[in-house]
Image: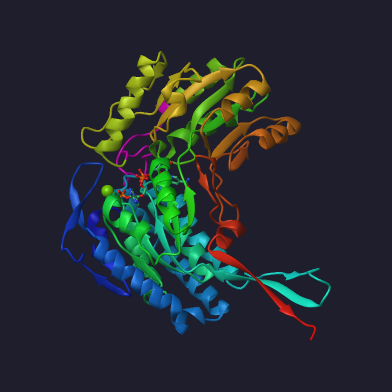
Amino acid sequence: MNSLNDLVLPSGKMLVGGDWRDALSGETIPVENPANGEIFAQLAAGGAEDIDLAVKAARAAFESPGWSKMRPIDRSRLLEQVALKLEAHAEELALIDSFDNGKPKHLAMMVDVPSAVEVFRYMAGWCTKIYGKTLSVSGDGRQYHAYTLRQPVGVVGQIVPWNYPLPMAAWKVASALAAGCTVVLKPSEVASLSTLRMAELILEAGVPPGVVNVVTGYGETVGEALITHPDIDKIAFTGSTNVGKHILRSSANDLRRVSLELGGKSPTIIMPDADLEKAIPDAAMAIFFNSGQTCFAGSRLLCHESIYDTVIAGINEVAKNLPIGPGQDPATMIGPVVNKKQRDRIQSYIEIGRQEGAEVISPNVPLPEQGYYVRPTILSGVTAESRVFNEEIFGPVLAATKFSTEEEAIKLANSSCYGLGANLYCKDMKTSHRMAAALQAGTVWINTYFVVDAAMPFGGFKESGIGREVGDEGVLMYTESKSVCALLDD
Ligand code: NAP
Ligand code: MG
């Protein structure tokens, strides 16, 4: 399975209340393959009226006994069924994203699809484990029986980006369903196809109609209609910090619940005692994997001065040996970036780095003639004040600088407005854990990177977001806590 002919692509219709339908406007959006610019599918260009129908369907499903009274153990079985379906269609889902997003299919099989499968399987376990507490109330001395209930927050609007389309959608849907919510999901119009295929499989798995609705279209129209719809109880958003701030502002009108997974500028810190045989290839892949389009990419290298030159040369050597090509080639390690807009944006940042005085180091390998490719690039010797050290580039571009002390490393790492992840390479365990505590990041990886797990809450400090996805915190984020207090005395 390696060509478009091997795929039955999703119809390009939207899923509303269990029906596959065109946008009410009848308009469509062309879907482009970033490896050659060819249009190979169409999406429905939804609008506010489509969102309204989807929210109504989600509300009806939320209130229907078929969903609201479903036994938790049966909800659990449904989520497990979805995991099995996704697993059975792993290669197809990976191939869809290789055409739609550009990512190498074999890497999507290793990372994206398992992440989606596992979150459904993990969340299946939570359906039967959402519980409140009994409380020791002092009150006025009379006897009370007090307890908390954890109840589903309601109808959730979920918005996801294009960089890991399938797992981002799966994380959100699985967590919300485990808590008993219903959802209206808006994928990025840049890569919606694997989400639509996942939605087909969700229905096939037996999830009742209306529980999961998918409306495709542009952020400014469909996204905006979703975040402002009066009958949405919560918005769960993954995307850029700018749009995240806009959503938070718009939530002030009715204080709807908002959780935000936003951008990052995560450091890879290499201490003088680090095992360089591991740290160098890891630091390279922490930025170059997925062509740098990872929210927690290790996009800033903070390297001890004693090993800086060795590390930079080593990362460049890794970069030289990463085959660049289309996502269907099993040798490809660096696929095209998602579209021309991103390619041009990344190139402009490389130019900004040059103008800011960085040394631009990039292997002189040929790029395919067509498609939106960017060579893995190191901007060496950047200053802490430079734009390339502070702004998210979202491409295979590493901004590198050196430090001399542990304190300086922490200060540099924490100087960012972001706080999503941090990779730390260090042999000494005391130093490692001291630094892990001091780093302002939602996840700190020690002597490893990119380990993201359904059991491990994921999210950001500072402008990288609000709230945590997956893990126990991720499922509880889709609940409201209610205190109930009953008088037992007469
Ligand atoms: P984006 O431009 O913020 O878009 C994210 C989603 O929001 C898309 O579905 C987009 O729709 C939609 N959107 C845009 N404007 C909107 C509006 N006014 N109202 C409601 N929705 C709107 O981000 P992106 O370029 O797709 O993704 C890259 C960013 O996501 C990076 O900053 C990256 O760090 C971040 N990210 C964060 C995480 C995390 O977990 N922290 C994970 C992955 C990515 P359209 O695309 O259709 O316009
Ligand atoms: Mg595309």
- For residue 100, side relative to residue 249 (left or right): left
Q: Quadrant of residue 319?
A: top left
Query: Which residue is more in the foreground, 358 or 131?
Result: 131
> Height in image: 107 above or below 279?
below
- Residue furthest to the right: 141
How far from the left and from the top, in percent, is residue 53?
29, 70
> Height in image: 275 above or below 339?
above
> Height in image: 106 above or below 135?
above
* Residue at the image point whose x is 49% and y is 22% from the top: 400
Q: Is residue 339 visible?
A: yes
Query: Which residue is more in the foreground, 363 or 395?
Result: 395
How far from the left and from the top, in percent, is residue 46?
24, 60
How far from the left and from the top, in percent, is residue 19?
28, 74
Q: Quadrant of residue 365?
A: top left
How far from the left and from the top, in percent, is residue 314?
51, 23
In reply to whether residue 73 is colored magenta, the answer given is no
* Residue at the image point whose x is 54% and y is 68% from the top: 179
- For residue 107, side relative to residue 134 (left or right): left
